[in-house]
Image (cartoon, helix red, strand yellow):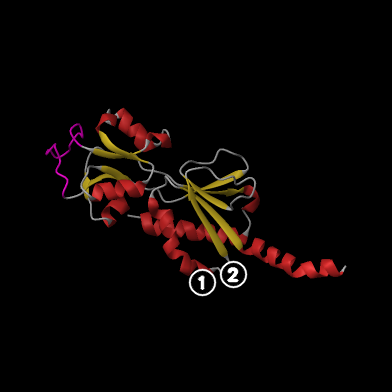
Amino acid sequence: LNEVRATLPDLQKIQYQLQHVFRCFQLREIPPPAKQHSGRFPKAALRFPGLRIEFDVDTGLSNLSTGDVDIAIRLAKPKSETLIGRRLTTIPLGLFRAQDYSLADKSEYPDLSGEQLLWLDHTLGPIPENIWLRDHGREDRSIVRSTSLRALEKACIAGLGIAPLPVYRGKELGLEVVPEPELPARQPWIVYHRDNRNNRRIRSVRNWIAACFKKEVGL
């Protein structure tokens, strides 16, 4: 009995941690706004006292069914009946270049046939950007392929070519927009398990994430 009593403080500590840890997962391939939420964590800490946030960014899919995470941010609507998807602010994409990069096609709407493209890697699968590149017959124009949007941003800033970026991000970086052809927008979703739909703690953080998206992406 004394041994059981001795373990009570540790058990209470574990219980506290389970009640106050919020786990969020985001795909690494997603355009940056959710990554930039980390800059908002201090305000979140004030809003949700006692809450510890575990923020994981990866290329894999988290398992919401097993409780690995409480919320995931994905670029596709969930298909499982056990999951709920909430539509976040749509992310418009555009083609951007640095001022130092001189377009080979000087017309008002360049067709990119003579341009150097900086693109997302084919290993990311049939994402809208890669489908667009294939359908426009411009795969042979990509001189850089990367799974990292940050890497494409840096290559673009260095004047190596034209990159597909979220419109808000291209403007933040002071890059020049290439007006045509138009890229498809991306639709992010905030996903959570159906059992957590009435969890006030998780709902509060969901609303916070949605507000961050609206502020960062809204044009």
Instruction: Give the extent of the magenta segment.
Output: 100-115
Q: Is residue 11 visible?
A: yes
Residue annotated with mark 1: 46
Q: Which mark is residue 88?
A: none
Q: Residue at x 47, y 69 (%)?
A: 42
Q: Is residue 49 left or right of residue 30?
A: right
Q: Nearer the viewer, residue 75 or 25?
A: 25
Magenta span includes 108: yes
Q: Nearer the viewer, residue 182 or 66?
A: 66
Q: Is residue 119 left or right of residue 28?
A: left
The quadrant holding residue 161 is top left
The residue lying furthest to the right in this view is: 1
Residues at discs 1 and 2 in contact (Cβ within 8 Å)? no
Q: Residue at x 31, y 28 (%)?
A: 135
x, y percent for residue 12: 72, 67
Magenta span includes 215: no
Task: Give the secondary structure at mark 1.
Answer: helix
Q: Residue at x 57, y 71 (%)?
A: 49
Q: Amino acid at mark 1?
A: Leu
x, y percent for residue 93: 32, 45
Task: Give the secondary structure at mark 2.
Answer: loop
Disc 1 crowd, CA 10 A, few/some/many (<14, 14-19, 20+): few
Q: Mainly helix, strand or loop, the magenta region?
A: loop
